[in-house]
Image: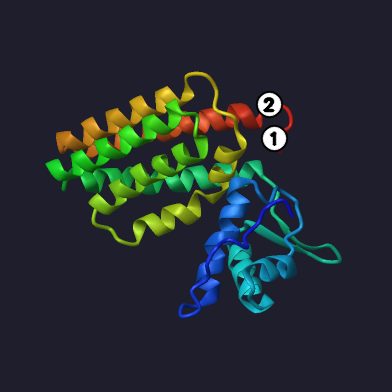
Amino acid sequence: MTFDLSSLRIDRSRPLREQIYPMVRSLILSGAIGPGEVIDEKAIAAQLSVSRTPVREAVKRLSDEHLVEVIAQSGTRAARVDRKAIEESFLIRRALEMESAAQAARLMRQEHADRLHDILARHARAIDRRQFADAIIRDDEFHRAISEISDLPRLWSTIEISKAQLDRCRHMMVPRAGQAEATLEQHREIIRALNSGDPEKAAVAMKAHLDAAYRSTVAVLDGPGLI
């Protein structure tokens, strides 16, 4: 293993599987556990000083999300990046986020706009500093904030699961020139659309943003060496 979880703190008063699941999920999405790489449940349990049971339960949950494959005679591995799964992930995410934006537009207030602009500023700083992992976090924070404005509390958790395959690509791709700046401008356009109070305009702005992001992903997938 090329990662170290030993510094992470486990809260023994809370269910272990609920804490280990996001840890292992993050390792897969970030590429710390690469596509096709064996997931060593015993080693993860040892690093976290827990039994293998909660690790096994977390891995089973990730298998249900198609992020992990259990292969006979070969063990448990991170799923390989699959083009069809990525396309399906995109289509589900786009439908959910267009609705999220449409609902949020009906409820927008100045405090919501201020929050989105603050996230945008932190996203821009991360890009300026070439802190791309942090930029991805700020990007997600922006989209999550819109789902929270929409007042649909379960929406983001559904979006987060549906976009997992896309997230793996985001972490694996080196940002191309101009791409980060284009993302920021698209986020500004989404804010403008939300502020208009027009649900259709907000949905269209979100669709344009996600379509552009997907085209960038496909361009890299069709290049050499990613899958």
Residue 164 location, x and y as percent?
A: 54, 50
**211 and 182: which one is in front?**
182
Residue 208 visible in rendering: no
- Answer yes or no: is residue 15 visible: yes
Answer left or right for 67 relative to 35.
left
Q: Is residue 75 above or below residue 163?
A: below
What residue appears at the point 57 percent right and 58 percent down from the top-left corner? Answer: 25
Query: What residue is rendered at 29% in x and 46% in y?
Result: 146
The residue identified by callout 1 is: 226
Query: Identity of the amino acid at label 1?
Result: Leu
Could you say which is closer to the camera, residue 85 or residue 29?
Answer: 29
* Relative depth, front residue between 22 and 125: 125
Residue 33 - label: none
Q: Residue furthest left?
A: 110
> Judging from the image, what secondary structure is the residue with disc 2 in?
loop
In percent of width and height, residue 18 lies at 50, 71
* Dots 1, 2 in contact, CB < 8 A: yes
Q: Secondary structure at mark 1?
A: loop
Horizontal and vertical percent position of residue 119: 31, 39
Give the distance between the C-alpha atoms of the residues marked 1 and 2, in whole angstroms: 7 Å
Residue furthest out toward the front: 7
Residue 46 lies in what quarter of the image? bottom right
Q: Quadrant of the N terminus?
A: bottom right
Instruction: Work out which quarter of the rendered image holds the C terminus and state it.
Output: top right
Question: Total of numbered circles in the picture?
Answer: 2
- Identify residue for label 2: 223
Find residue 224 and report its horizontal and vertical position in percent.
73, 27
Q: Residue at x 59, y 31 (%)?
A: 218
On screen, residue 151 versus residue 17, left or right, reads left
As drawn, 142 above or below 16 = above
Q: Amino acid at mark 2?
A: Gly
